[in-house]
Image (cartoon, helix red, strand yellow):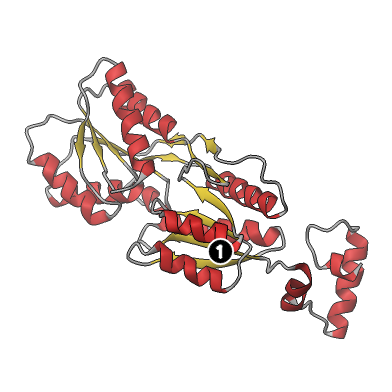
Amino acid sequence: MVSRAFNPNASISDDKRAYILEGAAKLGYKPNALARSLISKRSGLIAIALDSSANPMYDLQARMLALEIQAKGGHAILCPISNGDLDSAIQRAFEYQVDGLIIATSRLSSHVIEQCEKYGVCLSFINRYIGDVRANSVGLDNDDAGNQAADYFFKKGCSVFAFVGSEEGSMTCELRWNAYRRRVMELGLAEPIRIPASFDIESGMQAAEQLINSNHNVDAVFCANDIIGIGFIEGLKAHNHTGYKIIGVDDIPMASWPSYQLSTIKPPTDRICQSAVDDLFDRIHGNNEKTGEYILFKGTIVERAS
């Protein structure tokens, strides 16, 4: 009964839980997670591997994932990926004998999957689909995001479209571009111009300069994420240039700042994180029937001044 009182997911009445916790506090008793892990053969630790870039979206995801993990009685370990070295980040997680691993990055190697299989670590992906793997992926419906961006510009009367983004190995970027390109052409317009850019502000600024110096009469720019979009706006400011409608993806806090007012496609990040954690804990508890699924959530357009 006492152990169940300390487990937020255990079946026990609120009155009994409160009574036991009050008594434990008076006695100075605290449950020993290490001792419990020796008995259960489970550490209760969940690793979160995500890019250590300057994108605030990763910080928001990490916080939401950690809160969801704690709500299920687990403990989160953050494994930031430095210089794209996912293998080293994951190896540190294995040293703590984690029960599960959530990978929230576009970077992935077959070695990581093999290591998870070897150590019996359950997997869940965010915004990264991998077939033939004992794991599911949860994320934004990127096809829908591309379609929404194209339709948004078309309704605004735009006629020459561009896309900024080409992060190497980024599945999300490619899905957004392909859907956007396809929808623009379905609307009877010319194929959008694609300008390469990594997921950072400097790349967005360089893309703006490149487009300004080109001969293209672009009036609609879909940026692969908000960080690129913010950089693009900074680039326009640097050249005292206007005339583009711009939309990004993520709805990070900076997007709403008065100096940017970036229109964006807002993903339901809370639902995505909750679904990823739910899926992972189901897998940890033995439910491995559903694998290789991509659980998608549609975003919504947040219209601002850009």
Residue 271 falls left or right of residue 61: right
* Residue 289 picture quarter: top right
Seen from the viewer's position, the closer of residues 270 and 230 is 270
| Residue 10 in view, yes or no | yes
Seen from the viewer's position, the closer of residues 281 and 31 is 281
Q: Residue at x 87, y 82 (%)?
A: 26
Disc 1 element: strand
Seen from the viewer's position, the closer of residues 233 and 82 is 82
Residue 42, x across and y down, in percent: 71, 66
Amino acid at the residue labelled 1: Ala
Residue 209, x across and y down, in percent: 13, 46
Seen from the viewer's position, the closer of residues 14 and 166 is 166
Residue 241 falls left or right of residue 284: left
Judging by the rendered image, the residue that carries numbered circle 1 is 47
Q: Residue at x 75, y 74 (%)?
A: 38
Answer above or below: position of 213 versus 98: above
Quarter occupied by the C terminus: top left
Residue 273, x across and y down, in percent: 57, 50
How many other residues sit within 10 Å of disc 1, few (<14), some (14-19) or many (≥20)? Answer: many
Q: Residue at x 58, y 73 (%)?
A: 96
Residue 290 falls left or right of residue 261: right
Residue most extreme to the top: 188
Number of marks in the rendered image: 1
Quarter occupied by the N terminus: bottom right
| Residue 63 in view, yes or no | no
Residue 77, x across and y down, in percent: 56, 68
Residue 122 falls left or right of residue 303: right
Answer above or below: position of 232 versus 121: above
* Residue 153 picture quarter: top left
